[in-house]
Image (spheres, rainbow, N blue to C red):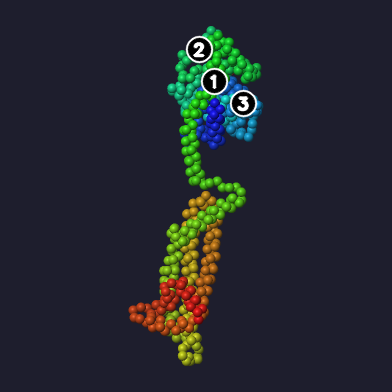
Amino acid sequence: MATMDSLIGLVNRIQRACTALGDFGGDDQAFSSLWDALPSVAVVGGQSSGKSSVLESIVGRDFLPRGSGIVTRRPLVLQLQQIEEGQQEYAEFGHLPQRHFTDFSLVRKEIQDETDRITGKTKQISPVPIHLSIYSPYVVNLTLIDLPGLTKVAIEGQPESIAQDIEDMVRSYVEKEVDPSGERTFGVLTKLDLMDKGTNALDVLEGRSYRLQHPWVGIVNRSQLDINKNIDMIDARRNEREYFATSPDYAHLASKMGSEYLAKLLSGHLESVIRARIPSITSLINKSIDELESELDHLGRPIAVDAGAQLYTILELCRAFDRIFKEHLDGGRPGGDRIYGVFDNQLPAALRKLPFDRHLSLQNVKKIVSEADGYQPHLIAPEQGYRRLIEGSVSYFRGPAEATADAVHFVLKELVRKSIGECQELKRFPSLQSTIAGAANESLEKFRDESKKTVIRLVDMESSYLTVEFFRRLPQEVERAGNPGGNPRSQEVEKAGNPRGNPRGNLREKLSSRSNH
Ligand code: GDP
Ligand code: MG
């Protein structure tokens, strides 16, 4: 019994979680409804037949609005939670989770006010439920749903469709339990005390009029007069017990009549239903967890609030971008190979296009040599003139060198753009995304300026000091270049500038060969 009680307690807790998460069942849910899978007890019956009164006597407290006419206008989902004897009894609303109601007349007022908040002070009804939990040592663990009573005609202030509206709403609440075989329906007959003298309800209570799988339970609630006279629940229960015990018609059924018996019956039945449903509830919870996990993956995990953890998250995101950029550059993702293309194709092609034909034309050579050496006739070779010619030629490399820095810069910038786009983790944080892109481009801009300075410096270094070896090699190379068929001058330039077909290696090699002298 103890485990069963905790089982119902567990279901009540799941139900409260459903309420907090906005799961009230129905088909319009994005996720499988846990609410729909949980068993509960709903009261269905005619208007003023005593439904609210029955629920109240099960709870053992006065707190539901009762009376004649349509009083219950929104479904009330009532969760009863047994607490230990001696503990303070209280009620709590789903819409007012912080407030503990210990005065149950205030509970009734809040139900009325909360009903009016949705429906206005009219006789309109609304299907939006009010959730109320009652914690008490005197209740059994149960979830009960009080519904507006079924009616046949609209009264003033109600739309013509009211009868149908109420039926639809009630049906939607009992749909999951609608029960053609009568397995889950408990018949409750109220107002036995109001029957005409000389008549009784034994045909119904003994199952002859309307057969249900479970036995019918007769109830005597407080009359309106009792309520007006403030007869409390304890007295009401005693009166009810007395009524059955002393009634000539029902005394033989007394142990199976009355609100207390009904409460035990319902609780016991609910236990067996929950027991049967636990496996499917468990698998539904697991399925929902899976659904929510994947939804969460889609939306992104929660972000920490404290500055340290946020910084960590930002660094993680920067690293993710960094990793992708590196893959583009070093391999794994495409794009980095274009840098290789710059040095292997673009630079040599640009060097080949340099105007050495013009610069080293006979006319220009004559001009430069005579300008450099002036009127002094040279004895062996026009040294100043040679130097000028070489300096002039080498400085032509500045243009392609700078253009190479620009071309690499352009490729890197494109890789940054691609990497930002491919970094899934950053998609959630557009402003961090643009900040990282901005910072990366700013750095690239700085690197471009630095590389341009460096390559120009390298070209200047090349042209500012020429080794003896260079001059010794020159006649041989000119001779070799003189072979028929080719373009002697451009080949000469190519060879002089690129002896191994590797412009980078060439600069380095020259520098080191120079330091050997
Ligand atoms: P509901 O509309 O079905 O929720 O019915 P209520 O619980 O509001 O009851 C309607 C009226 O019937 C109230 O005035 C109750 O006091 C009265 N009433 C309910 N049950 C009984 C009963 O068993 N005996 C008597 N005499 N009056 C009852
Ligand atoms: Mg009612």
| Foreground of the two, 206 or 275 | 275
Assess mark 1: CB under 8 A from ligand 1? no
Whether residue 384 sits left or right of residue 489 in the image: it is: right
Q: Eyeballing the image, is 51 above or below 428? A: above
Is tag 1's residue or tag 3's residue first in the polypeptide sequence? 3
Assess mark 3: CB under 8 A from ligand 1? no
Please give the name of the residue rendered at 51% of the width and 51% of the height, measured from the top-left corner.
425
Considering every residue shown, the one lying at the far top of the view is 198
Q: Position of residue 215 (x, y in %)?
A: 49, 18
| Foreground of the two, 396 or 316 | 316
Secondary element under disc 1, as helix, strand or loop, is helix
Q: Which residue is mark 3?
A: 137
Q: Position of residue 147 (x, y in %)?
A: 53, 25
Q: Eyeballing the image, is 272 above or below 307? A: above
| Foreground of the two, 38 or 489 | 38
User: Do the residues under discs 2 and 3 have CB atoms within 8 angstroms?
Assistant: no
| Foreground of the two, 494 or 115 | 494
Q: Which residue is mark 1?
A: 262
Foreground mark, 2 or 3, reads 3
Secondary element under disc 3, as helix, strand or loop, is loop
Q: Is residue 166 visible?
A: no
Please give the name of the residue rendered at 56% of the width and 27% of the height, measured from the top-left corner.
2
Q: Amino acid at mark 3?
A: Pro
Is tag 2's residue or tag 3's residue first in the polypeptide sequence? 3
Q: Eyeballing the image, is 97 above or below 451? A: above
- Which image quarter holds the N terminus? top right
Q: Amino acid at mark 2?
A: Leu
Mark pair 2, 1: CA separation: 17 Å
Is tag 2's residue or tag 1's residue first in the polypeptide sequence? 2
Please give the name of the residue rendered at 47% of the width and 54% of the height, measured from the top-left corner.
422
Q: Which residue is mark 2?
A: 202
